[in-house]
Image (spheres, rainbow, N blue to C red):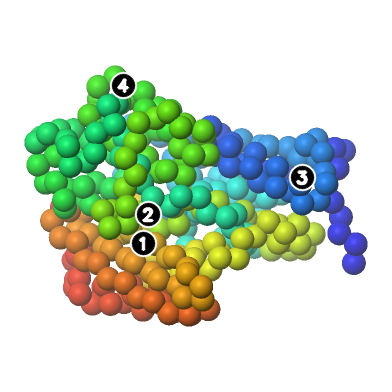
């Protein structure tokens, strides 16, 4: 069967959030499709879609609900045919797919780690007692307070640019950003200290772009298959199975990182009490093809150690 490709007259519509980082990810996807199928830029249309997570900036993410805050409106437009594919930051995605949609394409993962940001390039260990750190991530807050309970953490919402501006305005002494976002936006001049996995495990799926399409669209599925990075997909299967077993949302501090060396996959996972008073960590290694089962196994071990009420809000 001949593959039907988009044309300038009938462009493929790419749905995305409207932030500079989200648009950069959509442009990256477009460029890869153009290259893979020798298509002009006019064969694609970028459609920026406002999500609830973008619109409501004066409340913490945990107060707005769980995963889906940055994807539901985009998925609705995908389901009703207004866009043909949707480009997402995988860490924002629910582990449960809406009926009729497939999240099966992953671009090669960027740097998955966090960056610690201060105006003068200080490391976390150099922050004075009682310093203020801005973050909207419950995971980062819990991890930070677990290591430095003397620090004050304030809510820091908004795009990468907005959070950097808040730092310059003195709202906080430091903040965290994803290395992947800084790299994709070309922010090479932002003072940063890379945070290693030994210091702080990243969010599940951090640094990975995923592309969603309608299950019934076989031509689009075939196009996207040309972009899929198999090792990233294998790591995502492991990490997202880990998250699903833990019932992870924006209201639970969970971190996890799957890395592949040769045919072996290593998954490190962490869960924390919401106030950072306790952290439980463990890891598991095994064949790459067992990634999803390993994610479930590690999550089960951590839940057994945690006991009832571990994630209760404090």
| Residue 204 in view in this figure | yes
Per the image, the residue denoted by label 3 is: 34
| Residue 64 in view in this figure | no
Per the image, the residue denoted by label 4 is: 168
The answer to whether the residue labelled 2 contacts the one labelled 1, judged by CB atoms less than 8 Å apart, is yes
**Which residue is at a point 45% across and 57% down the rendered structure image?**
205
* Label 2 or label 1, whichever comes before in sequence order: 2
Per the image, the residue denoted by label 2 is: 203
Per the image, the residue denoted by label 1 is: 256
Distance between mark 3 and mark 1 Cα atoms: 33 Å
Q: Quadrant of residue 42?
A: top right
Distance between mark 4 and mark 3 Cα atoms: 38 Å
Q: Quadrant of the N terminus?
A: bottom right
Judging depth in this view, the residue of 75 and 121 nearest the camera is 121
* Label 3 or label 1, whichever comes before in sequence order: 3
* Label 4 or label 3, whichever comes before in sequence order: 3
121 relative to 87, above or below: above
* Label 4 or label 1, whichever comes before in sequence order: 4
The answer to whether the residue labelled 4 contacts the one labelled 3, judged by CB atoms less than 8 Å apart, is no
- Badge 2: residue crowd in 10 Å (few <14, some 14–19, many ≥20): many
* Label 2 or label 4, whichever comes before in sequence order: 4
**Which residue is at a point 64% across and 42% down the rendered structure image?**
28
Mark 4: secondary structure = helix
65 relative to 215, above or below: above
Instruction: Measuring from the top left, give residue 116's x and y in whole percent.
Output: 30, 40
- Badge 4: residue crowd in 10 Å (few <14, some 14–19, many ≥20): some
């Amino acid at each position: 069967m001949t593959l039907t490709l988009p044309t300038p007259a009938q462009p493929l519509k790419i749905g995305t959030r409207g932030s500079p980082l989200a648009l950069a990810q959509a442009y990256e996807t477009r460029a890869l499709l153009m290259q893979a199928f020798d298509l002009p830029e006019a064969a694609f249309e970028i459609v920026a879609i406002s999500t609830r997570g973008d619109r409501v900036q004066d409340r913490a993410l945990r107060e707005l609900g769980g995963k889906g805050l940055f994807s539901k409106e985009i998925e609705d437009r995908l389901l009703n045919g207004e866009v043909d594919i949707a480009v997402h930051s995988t860490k924002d995605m629910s582990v449960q797919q809406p009926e009729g949609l497939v999240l099966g394409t992953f671009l090669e993962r960027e740097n998955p780690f966090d960056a610690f940001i201060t105006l003068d390039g200080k490391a976390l260990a150099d922050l004075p007692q009682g310093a203020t750190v801005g973050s909207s991530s419950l995971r980062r807050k819990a991890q930070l307070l677990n290591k430095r309970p003397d620090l004050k953490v304030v809510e820091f919402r908004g795009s990468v640019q907005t959070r950097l501006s808040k730092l310059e305005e003195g709202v906080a002494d430091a903040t965290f950003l994803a290395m992947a976002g800084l790299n994709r936006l070309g922010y090479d001049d932002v003072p940063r200290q890379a945070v290693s996995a030994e210091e702080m495990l990243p969010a599940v799926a951090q640094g990975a772009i995923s592309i969603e399409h309608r299950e019934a669209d076989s031509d689009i599925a075939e196009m996207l298959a040309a972009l899929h990075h198999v090792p990233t997909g294998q790591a995502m299967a492991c990490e997202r199975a880990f998250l699903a077993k833990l019932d992870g949302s924006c209201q639970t501090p969970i971190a996890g990182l799957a890395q592949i060396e040769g045919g072996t996959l290593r998954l490190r996972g962490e869960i924390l009490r919401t106030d950072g008073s306790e952290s439980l960590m463990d890891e598991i290694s095994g064949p790459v093809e067992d990634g999803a089962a390993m994610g479930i196994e590690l999550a089960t071990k951590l839940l057994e150690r945690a006991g009832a009420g571990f994630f209760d809000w404090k």
